[in-house]
Image (cartoon, rainbow, N blue to C red):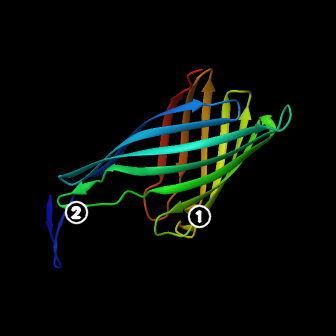
Amino acid sequence: KWQDTQLSLQRDFNSYDFSSIVGLSYLFNKDLSVGGAIRYIEEKIDDEKARAGSFDIGTIYRKKINSHKNFSLGVAVQNIALKKPQFITQKEELPTKIVVGGSYKPLGETLLLSTDLVMLKSSKPAANFGCEVLIYDILKIRSGYKLDPAYETSSRLTFGMGIVFNSLSVDYAYIPFETLTDTHIFSIGYRFN
């Protein structure tokens, strides 16, 4: 729908982003595992559509300190481009990043404390901190904080929850934004034992 104004012509348009990911991991021994994932990305702005593909690789080391304390350390490279998105004739770069993180469970599965350092190409490193509390072995309540000046003040705090039933998990995260619409993320996971 075109609207005539004194300064310029305006037109309403639609846009969306879609991403789907499938991953697989392998447990070498009780302490070390490696994994990878492949991702399909689709973006649409007005009548133009761009598709892309990327993959992630990573490893995690877990150490049980005693019967109820666990420590983990991981490294991942994410968004390695297989196909760059292209709108009309302009190709875009995917934000490849390196993430180094650790977590500590001081009370077994009841409490998880985590932090990571995120390094994006052409950006300053950023740190994230998180906490997860498990209630009655089924409900997980999460909160996080992004120590990154690129985020607006109110966008630095995140919240989430998850429900775990045997090998199935359903998760939700809420990320507030000042200038954009708030983000709601839903995911469903299944753990093969």
The residue identified by callout 1 is: 126
Q: Position of residue 74 (x, y in %)?
A: 63, 47
Please report the residue visible at 57 percent of the width from the left and 37 percent of the height from the top. 34
Which of 192 and 32 lies nearest the eye of the viewer?
32
Lower position in the chain sequence, tag 2 or tag 1? 2
Residue placed farthest to the front in the image? 28
Report the side of 45 relative to 177 (left or right): left
Which of 183 and 24 lies nearest the eye of the viewer?
24
Q: How busy is the neighbourhood of tag 1: few (under 14 within 10 Å), some, or many (20 plus)?
A: some
Report the side of 49 relative to 144 (left or right): left
Q: Is residue 29 above or below residue 113?
A: above
Q: Where is residue 62 in the image (x, y as percent from the top left)?
A: 71, 39
Residue 126, image quadrant: bottom right
The residue identified by callout 2 is: 90
Which of 137 and 70 lies nearest the eye of the viewer?
70
Residue 146, image quadrant: bottom right
Q: Which amino acid does the dot numbered 2 rest on?
A: Gln
